[in-house]
Image (cartoon, helix red, strand yellow):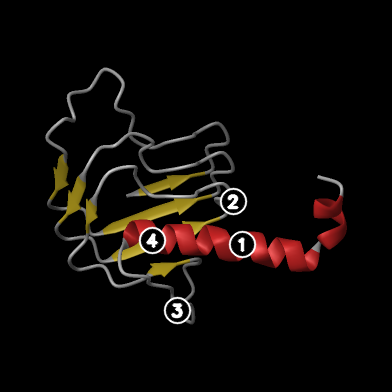
Amino acid sequence: MRVQNCELLEQVISEEGANLKGGVVLTKLKSLELIGLPRLGSFCLGNCNFEFTSLEDVIVMACPYMMTFSGGEVSTPKLHKVKLSGDDEDEGCWECGLNPTIQLLFTKKGIYLLKRFPFVFHFL
């Protein structure tokens, strides 16, 4: 599944009006690409639990505000890295799960920006 170039999208799945109390199980999704989503903060902002039994590839590219994947628990038994591009040379990143990995990548982006543009943060 690819979600790309949606400038106003803040989350992919919303709990509003849906009965997601038991969580969401996606058995056939093997690939997830989130690309060019400047306002995306999370795949799901709520406390919904997700189980992706077949998910093997995740690319998160140009999503500067994505701080976490979901507020709930996320199970991805076949996923072992999150890539920042579609390049074969991109080795990806992994930190004990999808949520911690997205959080680590967000933190690294902030540290990079602080080092690259310290004068901007000086005035905040």
Distance between the alpha carbons at the discs numbered 4 and 3: 23 Å
Residue 78, above or below 33? below
Label 3 belongs to which residue? 88
Name the residue tied to disc 4. Answer: 100
Q: Callout 1: 10 Å neighbours few (<14), some, many (20+)?
A: some
Looking at the image, is mark 4 or mark 3 nearer the viewer?
4
Q: Is residue 54 left or right of residue 71?
A: left
**Kind of element beneath mark 4:** helix
- Residue 2: x, y in percent? 38, 49
In whole angstroms, how far apart are the C-alphas of marks 1 and 2?
8 Å
Q: Callout 3, which amino acid?
A: Asp
Q: Nearer the viewer, mark 4 or mark 1?
A: 4
The amino acid type, in three-letter code, at marker 1 is Lys
Q: Secondary structure at mark 3?
A: loop
CB-based contact (under 8 Å), mark 4 and mark 2: no
Check residue 109 in the rendering and tell me which mark sits there, or answer none: 1
Q: CA distance from mark 4 to mark 1?
A: 14 Å
Can you name the residue that lies furthest to the top here?
17
Q: Nearer the viewer, residue 45 or 11?
A: 45
Residue under label 2, please give it. 64
